[in-house]
Image: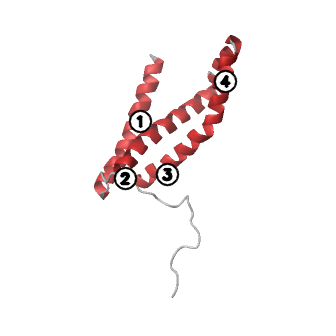
């Protein structure tokens, strides 16, 4: 009996459906949020030490690199939240048919995009 499975998987050539992309991004966002926790706790602790250290934290967070990191963490939080709701609904056997699952995945992308625009727009006003 010959095995017809691939010997290796080239992750750059695999084309995932939208449901797979949402699932993969959910895992990535969870890892990013988990890895950001120690730095967030450090900044929080530093900001509570004194008024000067609070100003130093504010100055650090206003750098272009940290603004990019904040956007990435905001995306991770929003995606993880909306995709998590989708997965909870799937666990309750809501939206498990192919068409409903695809629609739910697109709604996750739409909801996180609108939420990001609303939050960023609210901060800029």
Q: Secondary structure at mark 4?
A: helix
- What is the C-alpha distance between the residues marked 1 and 2? 24 Å
- Graded by Cα atoms within 10 Å as few (under 14), some (14 to 19) or many (20 or more), the crowding at tag 2 reads few
Question: Which of the image's four quarters has the C terminus?
Answer: top left
Query: Which one is nearer the viewer's eye here, 30 or 18?
Result: 30
Dot placed on the residue nearer the N-terminal end, 3 or 4: 3
Which mark is on residue 44?
Answer: none
Which mark is on residue 91?
Answer: 2
Determine whether label 1 and label 2 are within 8 Å by CB. Answer: no
User: Closer to the camera: disc 3 or disc 4?
Assistant: 4
Query: Which one is nearer the viewer's eye here, 4 or 13?
Result: 4
Which mark is on residue 45?
Answer: 4
Q: Secondary structure at mark 2?
A: helix
In the image, residue 1 lies at what x, y percent?
A: 51, 88
User: Closer to the camera: disc 4 or disc 1?
Assistant: 4
Dot placed on the residue nearer the N-terminal end, 1 or 2: 2
- What is the C-alpha distance between the residues marked 3 and 4? 32 Å
- What is the C-alpha distance between the residues marked 2 and 3? 17 Å
In the image, residue 3 lies at what x, y percent?
A: 52, 81
In the image, residue 101 lies at what x, y percent?
A: 33, 53
Q: Which residue is situated farthest in the bottom direction here?
A: 1
Dot placed on the residue nearer the N-terminal end, 3 or 1: 3
The residue that label 3 is drawn on is 24
């Amino acid at each position: 009996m010959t095995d017809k499975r691939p010997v290796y998987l080239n992750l750059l050539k695999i084309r995932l459906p939208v449901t797979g992309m949402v699932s993969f991004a959910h895992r990535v966002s969870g890892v990013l949020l988990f890895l950001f926790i120690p730095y967030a706790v450090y900044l929080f602790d530093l900001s509570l030490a004194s008024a000067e250290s609070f100003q130093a934290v504010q100055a650090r967070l206003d750098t272009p690199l940290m603004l990019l990191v904040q956007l990435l963490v905001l995306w991770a939080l929003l995606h993880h939240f909306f995709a998590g709701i989708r997965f909870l609904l799937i666990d309750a056997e809501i939206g498990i048919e192919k068409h409903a699952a695809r629609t739910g995945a697109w709604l996750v992308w739409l909801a996180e995009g609108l939420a990001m625009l609303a939050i960023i727009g609210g901060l800029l006003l």
